[in-house]
Amino acid sequence: MQFLRKKMLFIILIGIILLVVLIGYSLSDRENMSKPEKIINDTVGWVQSVVHKPVNYVTGFLYNIKEMKNMYQENQILKEKLAEYKGLIYEVQEVKEENEELRKLLDKPDSIRDYRAIDATVIARSPEKWIEQVTINRGEDAGVASNMAVITPEGMIGKVLSTSKHTATVQLLTGFDQFNRISATISRKDSKNIVGLIEEYDKETDSLIFRIIEESDKNLKKGELVVSSGMGGVFPAGLPIGEVKEVVYDQYGLTRTALVKPSADMYEINQVVVVDRGLPNPEKDDTSKKEDKE
Amino acid sequence: MTRIYIPLILFSFLVLEGVALELLPHSLVNQKLDIVPHWIFMLLVLVAIFYDREHTHISIIYAAVFGLLIDVVYTGILGVYMFTYAGAIFIVKGLSRILQSNLLSIILFSSIGLIIADISIQLIYFVIGLVHIEWKVYFMVRLLPTILANIIFLIICYPFMVRGLTNWKNRIHEDL
């Protein structure tokens, strides 16, 4: 009995030491996952993508039934919108062509808005609610790398946290903390853009905190669209992030922050696009994670 | 052959945990309640009570292995689930000698184990600064719904698992 108890104490102590070492290792500033982790993620990811198909089919079917109820009304609204868009498409095309021509004149083909899109499907979501991340079925083989932005047609949903050969983990906007800042902007006419940083996600108000750097433009309104500005060096410009919900002063009353509601639904994510900015900029990529505030 | 059934079942539930939130109705998920599927833990409780013998530690080893897999695949912070699952299963295994094993006592043991496991996970995340939530809120928003949901899962899979596990246990005993 004496021996048994000693053995148990020993095991518990070793366990605690191992736990601290493992946590310390996983919290350290590592660039990507280790080899065994990648292998595990690939194997589980393969099974997940197999399982996900029937599950997706079932949930999609249930969703469709729900959608059918208000199909008629939606159809009417969409028809109206479509007529508006026809004019818009023509205009956009003209503008695009003109832009290209002007760029050629300037001899400056790279734009801050350019990116290569990698299509992906979400195959799993972390059951642990505190850790807001999803797994997608594209990895290093498809050209996905960490820190790339991930978007849906509605807007930005997050960034790639780590990659393995065939899968990648995406950190959602709702899990962003102060180490993942996005430089964002609200577009205004006559170059009076409101510039600021999306700092973190506030769980209590369910919104992103957008700290406005410049105090120039005072009339920030509810419902205005916040887009990424491309100044951070990681994400391209023009990805929609969310809408302004409320403008509040910070605790010292010096700077204003806007509460931004993400435009993409974080719970119904299915098809996503990974945005590869593709700029050869290795130095910036290292520091981009800790983009400076001011 | 019999020996690989349990890891296979555990692995398939590891995969299913990733799509669990999609299967649940969105009105339930979107609300402020946090329901975390601890399916692997519930299955391991059954393994500990109906499959493990007094001198074997199969369930604890599985708890450590699959806890580590959850860490790698779903959270990225290694060791948290691994040690809390292993520790909680160890306690449940010790407790299970006190009472006869029927559905009620299993529910009691598994909820004790689940409370220990989930609070330890929470505590570790709190210490490393991942979670900032008041304990009172945590009990109402996360712990209670999680336990209820997982007990429902346990009751659903209890009949199938118990029959299977005792069968496999006897078969392995005959082989020896």
Image (tube, coloured by chain):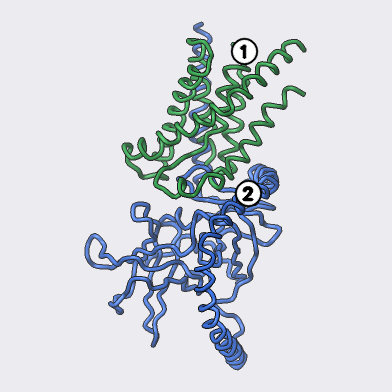
- Label 2: few (<14), some or many (≥20) within 10 Å? few
Q: Nearer the viewer, residue A228 or B13?
A: B13
Q: Chain of mark 1?
A: B
- The residue at the point 60 percent across, 93 percent down is A105
> Does the residue at mark 2 contact the one at mark 1 (Cβ under 8 Å)?
no
Q: Position of residue A263 (x, y in %)?
A: 46, 65
Residue at x 58%, y 90% (from the top left corner): A94
> Callout 1, which amino acid?
Arg
Outermost left residue: A253
Colour in which the image shows chain B: green
Q: Position of residue B104 (x, y in %)?
A: 48, 18
| Amino acid type, mark 2 | Val
- Mark 1 lies on residue: B53
Q: Colour of chain A?
A: blue
Q: CA distance from mark 2 to mark 1?
A: 41 Å
Position of residue B117 in the picture relative to residue B5 (left or right): left
Q: Quadrant of residue B108?
A: top left
Residue ID at (29%, 67%): A247
Label 2 vs label 1, nearer the camera: 2
Q: Residues within 10 Å of mark 1 (few under 14, many from 20)?
A: some
**Secondary structure category for the residue under label 2:** helix
Q: Which residue is mark 2?
A: A58
Looking at the image, is A1 positioned above or below residue B23? above
